[in-house]
Image (cartoon, coloured by chain):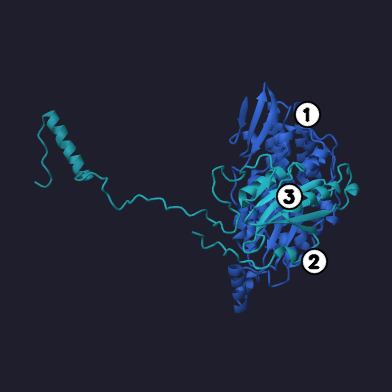
């Protein structure tokens, strides 16, 4: 019998259609069909200025928008040759926000993943924690989901007044909230029964399928872009790369949970550094618009601001592959410039797409009821899969 | 009709992929479609276990017009610690594809990860992959025409007839002689009065 799960199914975490051949309750073949959320973001980015393009790029992985922006912005900075000139405080803030968004993204995965298995209460705890992080995002950039806060050359503004206090409150509430969620979900025998030995993925298979992130580390390969190709100052922070050797859904679950603690460890380290003030935008008027205050006083500043906004800036020709460790794995951008004020090509390496593809293999022989467990354990985001 | 926002096709004179040796993000190998499979199979034998990504790029006016871009990573399957992973080597393989015959051998049998990536390049650039097990469109609907990420494909989609708008200025559908609402009420009062046998109220005008 052929059963079509989705594209409108609450447990497929978005618009995924899984065409499943079943015999009794056993899955014989599973073929994920994607593309229902294709919005042509890569095409749009080619038609926007370099700075404007990050607004659409943020919308790919909508659960951690700042990791997308961070990766793209750092790629363009490499093309411009200004990577070393980015102010320290901007790099620290990027790390802080990326790690906060990793926690927020894992909160969504944890909450919805629990709901898939009937654990409703965990959802509220996880989303409450995420809400606090979205509040911080709103403070930083003005929007909860897509703040467009990162700029090529640094940040739009410094972190505002009151941000640090709210951050301290979050850091303080985090351990208790995490303990509650672990008690609710990790220690839950029903959840363990559903996840242990489901969707087993060996290390060799994971590499062949291009799996990265928590799914790869759940199969015992300690590949983390933050350690293998450090960027934005990650080499200065202490954190462990969490691995598990089992390779099943429960291993991926535990890796993500422990990763949230490691992210919080980085956040606490960055928090200490943020007491030192400093510039957050590169001191190069080619890429940085003049401060708004000067516009009222200086004609040159007004013209300069107008030029930057209406024409953008040009990026020397070349191509670059920039990768970061997103919440779902290696998020990469292959960016090509032909010397114009718009990107020639922005190719995304979407970790969700490669991670989701392995469903074809791991679902075979499992129970149909475990499909939602496996999809949840791969944690796809369809804004990124379909782009 | 191309949108006004679409940059002119063929705006690139240079090949942007060959001019920046200063960026050390990956070792770059450039091959043609004929040598692609041998190159990639050789790299796989050398320990490049992971196909990170395969994507396309379009350079109209250049010969060959398209690039298929592979990123490979030299990652050991048994690397269970950060030290064992170290700093793996990354390779970028650029394969030029001519416009006249946009066919490239598939590597989906070497790395299953290539399956969807190649489908996506086929869908969005129109480059076919010889030997691919299931070469269908993946992002666009199955009956879509054209390949959206080609530079000559307009940003707002293919040219279409403008759909006809109803003309609300012509009120031909409104029945002629329909009384205005005040008149209707008066006519109704007359009817009611006649039915009850009462005196018919006179029109205001009379």
Along the line of sight, the residue nearer the viewer: B111 or A165? B111
- Give the color of chain A as drawn: blue
Q: CA distance from mark 1 to mark 3?
A: 34 Å
Q: Quadrant of residue B63?
A: bottom right
Label at residue A11: none
Query: x, y percentage for residue A56?
Result: 62, 55
Is the Cβ of the residue at disc 2 closer than 8 Å to that at disc 3?
A: no
The numbered mark, 2 or 3, whose residue comes first in the sequence reads: 2
Query: x, y percentage for residue B181?
Result: 23, 44
Q: Is residue A366 above or below residue A261?
A: above
Query: x, y percentage for residue A231?
Result: 80, 57
Along the line of sight, the residue nearer the viewer: B68 or A170? B68
Q: Residue furthest bottom?
A: A299
Res. B70 in view: no
Taking the image as shown, residue A66 lies to the left or right of residue A36, namely: right
Q: Secondary structure at mark 2?
A: loop
Residue to which mark 3 is pinned: B53
Query: Which chain letter goes with mark 3?
Result: B
Label at residue B22: 2
Q: Quadrant of residue A207?
A: top right
Q: Is residue A208 above or below residue B60?
A: above
- Give the color of chain B as drawn: cyan
In this rendering, the label closer to the viewer, 1 or 3: 3
Res. B52 in view: yes
Q: Residue furthest top?
A: A24
Label at residue A192: 1
Query: Which chain letter goes with mark 1?
Result: A
Q: Is residue A118 above or below residue A293?
A: above
Query: x, y percentage for residue A261?
Result: 80, 44
Q: CA distance from mark 2 to mark 1?
A: 50 Å
Along the line of sight, the residue nearer the viewer: B163 or A278? B163
Residue at 28 percent across and 51 percent down: it is B170
């Amino acid at each position: 019998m052929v059963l079509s799960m989705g594209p409108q199914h609450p447990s497929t975490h978005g618009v995924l259609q899984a065409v499943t051949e079943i015999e009794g309750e056993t899955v014989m073949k599973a073929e994920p069909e994607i593309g229902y959320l294709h919005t042509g973001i890569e095409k749009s980015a080619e038609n926007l200025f370099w700075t404007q393009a990050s607004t659409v790029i943020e919308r790919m992985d909508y659960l951690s928008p700042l990791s997308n922006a961070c990766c793209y912005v750092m790629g363009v900075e490499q093309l411009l040759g200004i990577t070393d000139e980015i102010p320290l405080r901007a790099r620290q803030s990027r790390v802080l926000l990326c790690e906060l968004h990793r926690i927020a993204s894992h909160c969504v995965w944890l909450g919805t993943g629990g709901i898939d298995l009937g654990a409703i209460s965990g959802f509220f705890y996880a989303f409450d924690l995420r809400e606090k992080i979205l509040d911080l995002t709103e403070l930083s950039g003005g929007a909860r989901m897509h703040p467009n806060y990162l700029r090529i050359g640094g940040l739009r503004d410094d972190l505002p007044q009151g941000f640090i206090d709210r951050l301290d409150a979050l850091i303080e509430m985090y351990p208790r909230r995490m303990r509650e969620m672990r008690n609710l979900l990790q220690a839950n025998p029903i959840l363990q029964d559903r996840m242990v030995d489901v969707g087993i993925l060996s290390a060799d298979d994971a590499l062949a399928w291009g799996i990265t992130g928590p799914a790869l580390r759940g199969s015992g390969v300690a590949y983390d872009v933050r350690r293998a190709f450090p960027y934005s100052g990650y080499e200065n922070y202490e954190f462990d790369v969490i691995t598990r050797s089992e390779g099943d859904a429960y291993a991926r679950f535990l890796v993500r949970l422990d990763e949230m603690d490691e992210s919080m460890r980085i956040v606490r380290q960055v928090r200490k550094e943020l007491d030192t003030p400093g510039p957050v935008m590169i001191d190069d008027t080619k890429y940085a618009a003049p401060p708004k205050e000067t516009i009222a006083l200086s004609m040159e500043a007004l013209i300069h601001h107008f030029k930057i906004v209406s024409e953008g800036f040009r990026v020397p020709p070349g191509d670059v592959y920039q990768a970061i460790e997103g919440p779902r794995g290696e998020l990469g951008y292959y960016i090509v410039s032909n010397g114009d004020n718009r990107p020639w090509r922005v190719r995304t390496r979407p970790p969700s797409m490669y991670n989701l593809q392995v469903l074809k293999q791991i679902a075979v022989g499992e129970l149909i009821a475990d499909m939602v467990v496996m999809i949840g354990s791969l944690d796809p985001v369809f804004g990124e899969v379909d782009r | 009709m191309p949108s006004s926002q679409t940059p002119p096709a063929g705006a690139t004179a240079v090949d942007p992929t060959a001019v920046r040796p200063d960026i050390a993000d990956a070792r770059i190998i450039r091959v043609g479609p004929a040598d692609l499979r041998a190159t990639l199979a050789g790299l796989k034998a050398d320990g490049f276990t992971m196909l990170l990504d395969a994507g396309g790029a379009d350079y109209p006016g250049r010969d060959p017009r398209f690039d298929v871009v592979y990123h490979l990573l030299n990652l050991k399957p048994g690397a269970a610690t950060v030290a064992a992973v170290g700093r793996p080597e990354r390779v970028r393989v650029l394969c030029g594809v001519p416009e006249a015959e946009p066919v490239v051998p598939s590597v989906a049998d070497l790395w299953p990860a290539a399956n969807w990536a190649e489908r996506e390049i086929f869908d969005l650039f129109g480059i076919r992959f010889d030997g691919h097990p299931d070469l269908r469109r993946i992002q666009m609907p199955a009956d879509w025409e054209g390949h959206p990420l080609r530079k000559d494909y307009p940003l707002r989609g293919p040219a279409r007839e403008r759909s006809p708008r109803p003309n609300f200025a012509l009120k031909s559908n409104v029945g002629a002689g329909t009384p205005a609402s005040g008149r209707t009420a008066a006519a109704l009062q007359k009817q009611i009065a006649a039915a009850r046998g009462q005196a018919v109220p006179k029109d205001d005008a009379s």
